[in-house]
Image: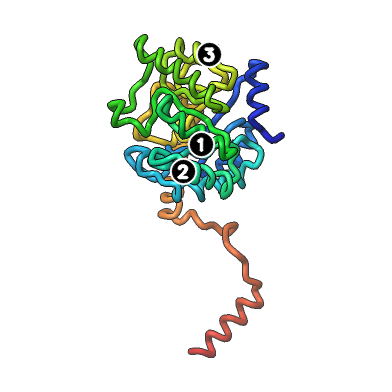
Amino acid sequence: MTKVTAQTLIEKKRAKQPITWLTAYDFPMAQFEEKAGIDIILVGDSIGMTTYGFDSTLPVTMDLLIPHTRAVRKGAPNVFLIGDMPYMSYQVSAQEAVRNAGRFMAECGCDAIKLEGGREVLDTIKAILRATIPVVGHLGLTPQSIAMLGGFKAQGRDADTALRLIEDAKLLEDAGACMILVEAVPPEVGKIIAGRAQIPIVGIGAGPHVDGQCLIVHDMLGMFEAFTPKFVKKYASIGEQIVAALKDFAQDVAKGGFPASEHCYKMPEAEARKLEERLGQLR
C-alpha cells in the first residue's frame, strides 16, 4: 500500500474518488485495515466506549490514547493516521492543546490530529497549525459535547443550526484545517458543506454526497452491543461469531474433545521410559 498523505486525499476529492475512514485501536485491527486498503485510520476517543466500557468518551485521556495510537501506527504504517484529541486535552489553553497535539506527532507518528468544534476552537486550531501540526475538524454531533447537545442526537435538522454548521465548516477551512469530519447531519447539509469546500469532507452519518465515509470499526463489524446509531451499516456479525466460538471451546473442553492428540507435544518413547525409571527410583 502506497503511503496516504494529505495531498493524496485532496487529489481523491478532486477526482471524485470516495475516501474510506475507519477507527482502529490496536495493532491487529490496524494491520487488517491497511491490508484492506483503508485510506484513513482514526484512533478515536470512541475507544472509551468500544474497548473500555465507559458510558461516554469523556473519561478518555491522552495517556490512555498514546499507547494505542503508537500500536496502530506500527500495524498500519502507510495509512493517514489521525490522533483524536480527548476531552479537556485542548479546551483549557492553546499552549496545552499544542503540547498534547505534539505528543501524537512525536510519540506516535500521526499524520494529523482531530478536535471537535466550530468557531469556538478557531484560535486553538491556529495555534496547533503554527506548531506545524495538521488539524482535522469535527462538526455536527460532537460526542464530547453531549451534555450541551442533550445526548447523542442528529444535528443540523433545522435551517438555523444547518446554516451554523455550514458557516463553521467554512471557518475551519479558512483557519487551515486539512479535512473535516461531519457527523450525524441530514444529507442536504453534508452535500452543501462538501460542495463548498476545497478540502475533503468525510461523513459519519452525513449522507452520500460527501467526499468519503467513516464508521466506527466495532459498529460495522457487529462488535459493540450497547447501541447502534442509525447511520451504521453492519458488514459482519463478528461479535456473534466470537460468542459461538467461545461456546464451542467450552463444550469441547467439557466433553474432553480438546485437547486432542494433534494438539499435544510428543515425548520420544525412550525418554518416556527413562522418565518412568527415574520416577521409580524416587519412590
Q: Is residue 1 something that shows in the picture?
A: no
- The picture quadrant where one finds residue 94 is top left
In which quarter of the view is residue 53 placed?
A: top left
- Quarter of the figure with residue 60: top left
Up the image or down, 112 lies above or below 232; here it is: below
Q: Which residue is mark 3?
A: 209
Q: Which residue is mark 2?
A: 95
Left or right, 225 with respect to 200, comes to left
* x 57%, y 19%: residue: 211
Q: Looking at the image, is 212 positioned above or below residue 115?
A: above
Q: Position of residue 268 (x, y in %)?
A: 66, 72
Q: Secondary structure at mark 2?
A: helix
What residue sits 51% from the left and 57% below the top?
A: 259
Q: Is any part of residue 271 visible from this angle?
A: yes
Q: Position of residue 44 (x, y in %)?
A: 47, 38
The residue tagged 1 is: 127
